[in-house]
Amino acid sequence: MRNLTLQRLEVFKSVYEEKSVSAAARRLKLSQPTVSRHLRDFEAAIAMKLFELDKGRIIATAEAEVLYSECIFLSEGVAKVDATIRALRRGEGQPLSVMTIGLLAPEILPAAVEATLQSLPALNLTLDAGAADVQIRALKDGRIDVGLAAGSIAPESGLTFQPIGKGHFVCMVPLEHPLSRGARFPLTSLRAEGNWIKMPRRPIGALLEDALDRAGVPPRGNITANSLLVMTGLANRLRKCVVVDNFTAAAFKVPSMVAIPVEPLSEFTIFAVSRAGQTQRNATTTFVANVEAALARYGSPTREGPFTAGPAKAGPAKAE
């Protein structure tokens, strides 16, 4: 019956229990005329009289007595649905497995997790780090729900790549270096540096190699660091310039070095990767939105001193 709505049943049930239209209106936080209108419309829709007025008192009809006995289950059902909604909003019973590339692990991932748990405090999170190719295999095998990757990544059948932010390259320069006070570090200056520490040719490293090639800088690095985690410390120890991403530079600050955006500025895209056609759960969309917000807080590329603070905190993305 199209006219049998939840609101009309709630109005009927409240009037029956309160034995008063005005008391039912207060209980439902509605105006008295609104409750009276819903009751009249309900009686008209079912072609039955549910209440009689006797000396100012509301008396339930025999039909109302039968209908009310069925409405008892309504409260139980509504309470169950309400409890389920509250559980979903808290993330109860919802697992979310995430794998990120290393450069987002120290700063971006913790910020996004913190904000997500403010919205979904009972969410069951599993976190891991892995290169883009590892993430792709894990996604295809169904071992993770979301991957966070970056750089030059070839499209993969069955996967969706959602751009959620940008990163850029910076040069970590020793303070005694003549270019340490500049607003930009020209990539062409690496020609005079001799051998330097370089990234492997992976999705981000390949972009850097291409930028160096366009700048006419030959690949003379005699040390290849397969992990970004070691690059800033190694460069500090050897007193060498090293080009890394802005996230690594911010997470692993070295007091005796300064991070300077390279010239020409070379950016890369950061992606949230998921299985194509996968139903996007609230937990997934909330987490990805918080990663995007954390990335945005890094702002535009600027020269960062050796003790530059990390990005300011912001509130969590709202869970819909």
Image (cartoon, rainbow, N blue to C red):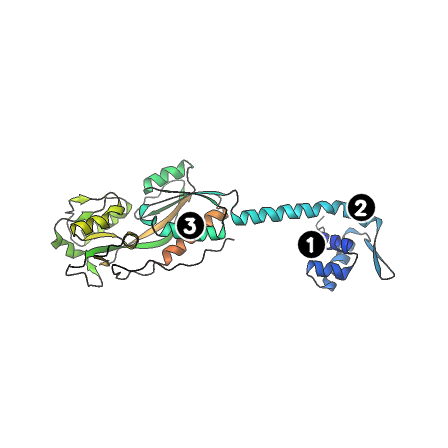
Say which quarter of the image contains residue 136. top left
- Residue 150: which disc? none
In the image shown, does 239 or 292 lie closer to the viewer? 239
Distance, label 2 to label 1, CA atoms, is 19 Å
Secondary structure of the residue carrying numbered label 3: helix
Left or right of residue 267: residue 121: right
Seen in the picture, residue 309 relative to 125 is either above or below; the reply is below
In the image shown, does 176 or 15 lie closer to the viewer? 176
Q: Is residue 263 visible?
A: no
**Looking at the picture, how far across and down is residue 229, in whole percent?**
27, 47
Q: Is residue 123 visible?
A: yes
In the image shown, does 106 or 287 lie closer to the viewer? 106
Residue type at mark 1 is Gln
The residue under label 2 is 66
Secondary structure of the residue carrying numbered label 2: helix
Say which quarter of the image contains residue 157. top left
The residue under label 3 is 113
Say which quarter of the image contains residue 22. bottom right
